[in-house]
Image: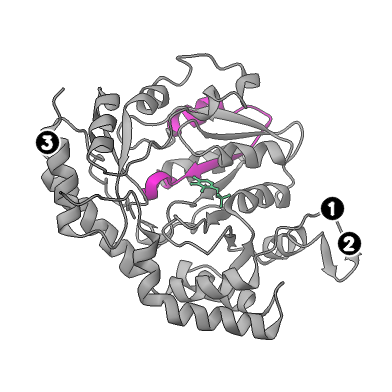
Amino acid sequence: MPVPVPFLDLRAQLVPLRQEIDAAIGRVVDSCAFVLGEEVSAFEAEFAEFCGVPYAVGVDSGTSALHLILRALGIGPGDEVILPANTFIATAEAVSLAGARPVVVDVDEETHLIDPELVERAITPRTRAVIAVHLFGRTADLTSLKTLTDRHGVHLIEDAAQAHGSRYRGQHVGSVGVATGFSFYPGKNLGAFGDAGAVITHHAAFRDTLLELRDHGQKRKYEHQRIGTNARLDTVQAAVLRIKLRHLESWNAARRQVAERYGALLRDSEFRTPAPLRPGEDHVYHLYVVRHRNRSAVARALQENRIGFGIHYPVPVHRTEAYAFLGMGPGSCPTSERLASEILSLPMYPEMTAVHIERVCDVLAEIQL
Ligand SMILES: *Cc1c(COP(=O)(O)O)cnc(C)c1O
């Protein structure tokens, strides 16, 4: 019986770190400093250093990270924020949670990422920000986006929930935008033992505002400067993340190797593999997404052969029921809509072996269409 291949294997990552993580969690439990304990500020300092920025603020999810960035920028009712149709719903939800209106634009056919030309056309006097999503781990075109957001006097925000450690022109994601949101959802390239997230920024005042917003708008206990929320990063999660952060670069390198192997094995197949990186771009392969016109047959074959897969995402943001009120009918973002019907994410995790990768590609090669 051929080996089954999971879509991702969190256990494989956990096993070698188990004792170290158990000990770190044990120390948090012993300290009883469950909320905003020392591990939180230690992780914030280490994550900021990793990203090459002065400040990081730990929060309870990637969704909160983006939501609080928008709040800290004073974006709310009456404002518009531009984002790509091809992203996880949270990018749009953050805008809605802030009370602003998401303006959804189509993506580039090759990169699957936000198309700067369409962003420019979508700018109105109400536009306050653009969210560049480094989807799947690939860096968005920050040069064009920064130029055009500067020209129009709007903020550039980066959603790096899938791109920890990815570099644009040699600089970590987060170096161009006014602030950048990360998710540490367990399956992300850097994952906690539950929900967690962070914001990074170059600006001290922005950091201070975020610290207040995540903690009931207070600077000191019971001195509520503004209406905030409870979006703090748990101490236990920070302790786990500190240990895992030390391995992120080598995990990303392993992901790149898996991607390279997939690319070589699928080169002459009917599957469209990720477009080659353009100068300055980087990819940390949170997901390895291929395209095929007959996706349902591919999905069936993978299922029958016990090979895990995903679809990221089956419905573009503007076509979800939640965002029906935007009034964007079929064909309003044709590239994203076509991608949604053709894309499929193959198994991808740092511990994947050559045997696993070959097995996936063998099954793909045998599919009768
Ligand atoms: C995961 C993700 C988020 C949200 O992060 P959570 O931690 O799940 O709230 C936002 N944007 C993108 C692109 C994501 O992949």
Looking at the rendered structure, the kind of residue marked 1 is Ile
In reply to whether residue 219 is colored magenta, the answer given is: no
Q: Which residue is mark 2?
A: 224
Query: Can you say whether 316 is above or below 282 in the image?
Result: above
SS category of the residue bearing label 1? loop
- Res 306 → quadrant: top left
SS category of the residue bearing label 3? helix
Task: From the viewer's perspective, tell me whether residue 304 is left or right of residue 343.
Answer: left
Residue drawn at (19%, 53%), measured in percent from left and top?
Answer: 356
Task: From the viewer's perspective, tell me whether residue 288 is left or right of residue 212.
Answer: left
Task: From the viewer's perspective, tell me whether residue 47 is left or right of residue 65.
Answer: left
Query: Can you say whether 47 is above or below 289 in the image?
Result: below
Q: Which residue is mark 1?
A: 227
Quadrant, the C terminus: top left
Residue lying at the far front of the rendered structure: 1
Give the magenta part as a residue range.
116-142
Mark whose residue sits in front, 3 or 1? 3
Residue drawn at (26%, 40%), measured in percent from left and top?
Answer: 274
Q: Which mark is residue 365?
A: 3
